[in-house]
Image (cartoon, rainbow, N blue to C red):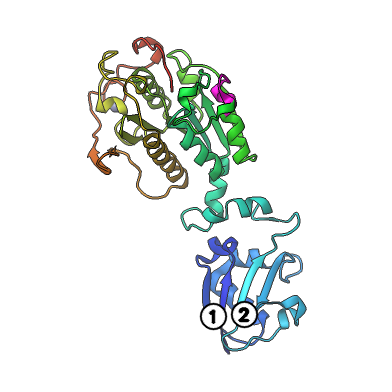
Amino acid sequence: MVKVNVKFSVMFKDATGTTGITVDTAGETVKDLIDALIKQFGLQFSERILDAKTGGVRRFINIFVNGKDIRNLQGVDTKLEEGAEVRLIPAVAGGNEFLGFTQDQIVRYSRQIILKEVGGAGQKKLMRSSILVVGAGGLGSPASLYLAAAGVGKIGIIDSDRVDLSNLQRQLLHTNDDIDRPKIESAKEKLLKINPEIEVIAYKERLTADNALNIVGGWDFVLDGSDNFPTKFLLNDACVLKNVPFSHGGVLRFVGMTTTILPGKGPCYRCLAPEAPPLGMIPTCQEAGVLGAVSGVIGTIQATEILKYLLGAGDLLVGRILFFDALEMRFEEFELKRDPKCQVCGDQPIIKDPSQVDYGHVCEVRF
Ligand SMILES: [Zn+2]
């Protein structure tokens, strides 16, 4: 019986729950060690490491003892000495697939697959997910960049605007060369440059009371990156009616706020404010200004919430509003309760179809 230290590649982590352990083997060889590991970690581990047909170690699994490949020693009959270090690593060269990931995907997502909350299964979930980003602007830029980088399989972007020089101070999807291009074109190009594996669907149109239900329906999650109240209320109503979770975000000057809305499971944006303030009462970013980095903070929090939702990890900002004050550099949190009288998610909702609601005059909308 020898005691050896075993280190697993990240790719084994969902089967072993750990990247390293000390094992007491019954015998002295690598084969004895593998038997001990299978006994400890069960079928899932066994399927990873053993070829079902031959019963031997899968060809693409490399086993190193004290830094030496056992293929250059005595294979699975290699003797283990007390305190030996054994590493199990799947091959990362060539066109092999592992757990259904390509080698490039394993490397691309390695820093998040290693997280217990992500793992191989979580990464697969992200790759199968679809997110609609409303507005390729100050919030939509950082959010969509992170979602694309994380491997969210399908990202929709809706924006009817063209890139303006004044956007570049905060809308990091766009560069100087994109001025006058439709924002969705510029956005699609950047997201695919970061991650060519994803699909980007661009809607060069404005979200209206007539198209909102159609556009919002079917997505796993919607990100509100708009900067005007009519769109925010319209998006809220459409998401609640279509039962699509969404992240609300808003920024102005040095402050920002965000909350996560899961229809049927918590309050909605209309529970916070029953209707939009009259036009002109609250200034827009255009009129009041905004520090670009503040939209970066809020947009990034929104992307984080989305990734958490997709992974089923942690606590979401449901029933909580997070306020960010950059000048004081302080976050504050307030409770948001579902309003039984809410017009869209209350006990007796009045709003059944956005096309029957007056959302106010949506003029000069710039995300
Ligand atoms: Zn509500």
Query: Disc 2 beta carbon < 8 A from ligand 1?
Result: no
The front one of 117 and 182 is 182
- Would residue 183 be visible to someone looking at this image? yes
Q: Which amino acid does label 2 sit on?
A: Leu
Q: Give the range drawn in magenta.
A: 178-186
Image spot of residue 37 (x, y percent): 58, 74
Residue 23, labelled with which disc?
1
In the rendered view, tell whether residue 165 sits above or below residue 139.
Answer: above
Image spot of residue 198 (x, y percent): 61, 38
Residue 74 lies in quadrant: bottom right
**Residue at point 25%, 28% (across, down):** 272
Query: Disc 1 beta carbon < 8 A from ligand 1?
Result: no
Ligand 1 quarter of the rendering: top left
In the rendered view, tell whether residue 86 sits above or below residue 151.
Answer: below
Secondary structure of residue under mark 1: strand
Q: In this view, does 131 lie to the left or right of 324?
A: right
The front one of 105 and 31 is 105
The front one of 142 and 239 is 142
Q: Mark 2 points at which residue?
A: 33
**Residue at point 69%, 60% (across, down):** 92
- Would residue 119 be visible to someone looking at this image? no
Residue 243, labelled with which disc?
none
Q: In this view, does 15 lie to the left or right of 302?
A: right
| CA separation in Å, label 2 and label 1 | 8 Å
Residue 183 lies in quadrant: top right
Secondary structure of residue under mark 2: helix
Residue 151 part of the magenta segment:
no
Image spot of residue 280 (x, y percent): 28, 14
